[in-house]
Amino acid sequence: MIIPPFPGVRNTRKGLSADALYDLVRNAFGQLPDHRHPKATIPLTDAISSAFAMFSLKDPSLLAFDERRNDKNMKTLFGIGQIPSDTQMREILDPLEPDLLRPLFHDVFRQLQRGKALEPYVFHDGCYLLALDGTGYFSSNKVHCNSCLEKKNKQTGEVTYQHQMLGAAIVHPDHKEVIPLAPEPIQKQDGSTKNDCERNAAKRLLRKIRQEHPRLKLLVVEDGLASNAPHIRDLGESRMHFLLGVKPGDHEFLFDRVTEAFEQDRMTVFSWNEGDVTCEIAFTHKLPLNESNQDLLVNFLQYAEYGADGHRRKYFTWVTDLRVTRGQARHLVRGGRARWKIENETFNTLKNQGYQLEHNFGHGQQNLSVVFAMLMMLAFLVDQVQQLCCPLFRAVWKKLGSKRALWDNLRSHFRHFTFTSMQHLYEVILHDLAKELPAPRLDTS
Ligand SMILES: [Zn+2]
């Protein structure tokens, strides 16, 4: 059954609708070098586009996606000529170098810049807030590949194989949507038997982000694990400002200097009330980060909330290279607290809101697990851009009440009817046009 296009909400910014973004991504996939024999039956573009479509549709498994092999929508909406079987998709994507997918994130980012959709994300003095954090998404005692991290149980000798990634996303305290940049896998490096670690991955990621975005002004927000001297020096070399969580237990030397600054009246302190809650900010400048790096001076910012009983309920502390002023301190506190968006709005969404980051879609021998994780992040980026820029997408989401219902509807409409575009599909869902149709498409030819 073909439903005619329906005129509706059409004020999505040019280049930022689902159709424009799927086109953009599909064209970029087409530029990737094919590592296989020139006579390979399924084009690489089709295999990568298929994986991207699977994550865009939130199919629960490769097997579920396999049922789409005769679906005309795959050609019309995702531009896929030949859909590979699940086995073919795994074989084709396994040798793909994950870094080849990084430019795709940049292409979408550039569209956002062109569409002026990023301007509201500027946070402080022309800088965007860039939240960085690591997460694990695969763990097994049996399944493993060449790039798995290996953790050996000291008592039993049993090896656990893992995959982790360092994620990066532009966030803003006033906006729910996050704009992920390409993540960096934390994995065993080529020719190395030594496991990678988050700090090395961060070094690589900062370098790559700087290459991709040479002039982008960034203020990096991270948790307490990041407030160490080598990483702060890496941030400086990458010309990035920082606002990093810091904990008294991990930075005793620094917090002794903080106590001294309070005692010697070198701390600027001010407070205000919000209902029964008293909020207090304190800051000072040029404290040594730790005993062994006394030449590395950082500025210190603290935020606390006290209940009516005087009991401290919330307490956050950061170190930063930015000069803190009374006028800007509250704003910076909001920026520091927006760091959780990479955990909550990014990783938790990918794990629990239909994307299934922790599901094993296929592990492969070389890069498959990493390639799938990158493509899922790319599909998430495209979804976030739609959510940010496409009124039609937002209207459908609002009507259905949840993302889960939205993805379910998307899949069932996709299965039963034939559409001319994603806009067409969203309009049909929004205006309930499908239920007026006689019968769902039953043939699968
Ligand atoms: Zn692996």
Image (cartoon, rainbow, N blue to C red):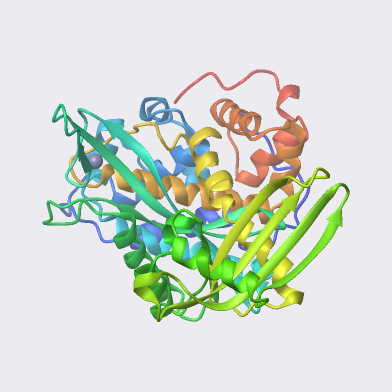
| Image height of 260 relative to 445, above or below | below
Q: Nearer the viewer, residue 74 or 294?
A: 294
**Residue 58's x, y, as percent?**
50, 34
Residue ID at (17%, 50%): 39
Q: Nearer the viewer, residue 70 or 319?
A: 319
User: Is residue 207 something that shows in the picture?
Assistant: no
Residue ID at (68%, 67%): 282
Q: Which quarter of the frame holds ligand 1?
A: top left
Q: Quadrant of the rendered structure where residue 425 is?
A: top right
Q: Quadrant of the rendered structure where residue 302 is?
A: bottom right
User: Is residue 62 something that shows in the picture?
Assistant: yes
Residue ID at (16%, 57%): 190
| Image height of 406 relative to 46, above or below | above
**Residue 235's x, y, as percent?**
42, 73
Furthest-front residue in this view: 263
Q: Is residue 280 left or right of residue 370?
A: right
